[in-house]
Amino acid sequence: MNYSQLPGIIGERFFAAMDMNQTGYIDLKCFVRGFFKVYYSSVEDKMKLAFEIYDFDNDGYIDKEDVRLVMSHIPVDSAVKEEMNGEGRFTQENGGNMAFLDRIQTQQEIQLLLDEVYGSKKRLSFDEFKRVNMEDTSEMFLSIMLMLQTHLPCSENFFRYKQNYTKYVSGDGEE
């Protein structure tokens, strides 16, 4: 998790989504697949990744609290700082220098979003999550993907491997 430099629970959830074997470890194959999902996959695969980050208990559903918890850890100010200490470094100050009132307002906005998305429903399946993000509001999906794409360390060498994406996501990495 130190490699990703993602804040709090988001780093843990990204790790869990990448740990396809559920061993508590990420091997090279899972690592490459996870990063390729973030940068090179289809919109549907990216939505599945976002859904997996929200789905704490891996039951195929996400409830309001799952979404609220993850979205509460997304930095309010996700702009890249002018001065970076190293590749992919993310501020350890909870997303930047924001005022307490900004965080309160963000929590209120998250609650409004959840009320709009969930209504009287207790949870969403992946198909419902996809429909909401395609037809109603893409806030839940885009907030995760934007943060992953702007805060994960990714060197030029990784981009050079784009042509191998299909090879690695096909299953065994063999051609």
Image: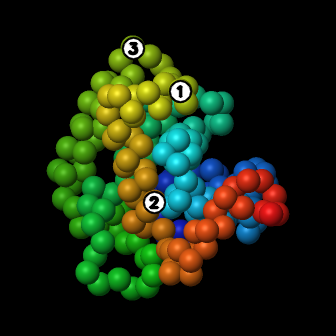
Q: Give the residue drawn at x 55%, y 54%.
A: 41
Residue designated by label 1: 127
Camera-side mark, 1 or 2 = 1
- Dot 2 falls on a residue whose secondary structure is helix
The picture places residue 35, in percent across and down from the top left corner, at 58, 63
Residue 175 falls in image quadrant: bottom right
Q: Give the residue drawn at x 67%, y 58%.
A: 166
Using the image, tell me which numbered label, if any, was put on residue 120: 3
- The disc, 1 or 2, on the residue closer to the chain's N-terminal end is 1
Q: Amino acid at mark 2?
A: Leu
Left or right, 46 with respect to 79, comes to right
- The disc, 3 or 1, on the residue closer to the chain's N-terminal end is 3
- Dot 3 falls on a residue whose secondary structure is loop
Badge 2: residue crowd in 10 Å (few <14, some 14–19, many ≥20): many
Q: Give the residue drawn at x 69%, y 55%.
A: 169
The picture places residue 161, in percent across and down from the top left corner, at 61, 73
- Dot 1 falls on a residue whose secondary structure is helix
Badge 3: residue crowd in 10 Å (few <14, some 14–19, many ≥20): few
Using the image, tell me which numbered label, if any, was put on residue 148: 2
The picture places residue 50, in percent across and down from the top left corner, at 51, 45
Q: Amino acid at mark 3?
A: Ser
Q: Nearer the viewer, residue 37 or 76?
A: 37
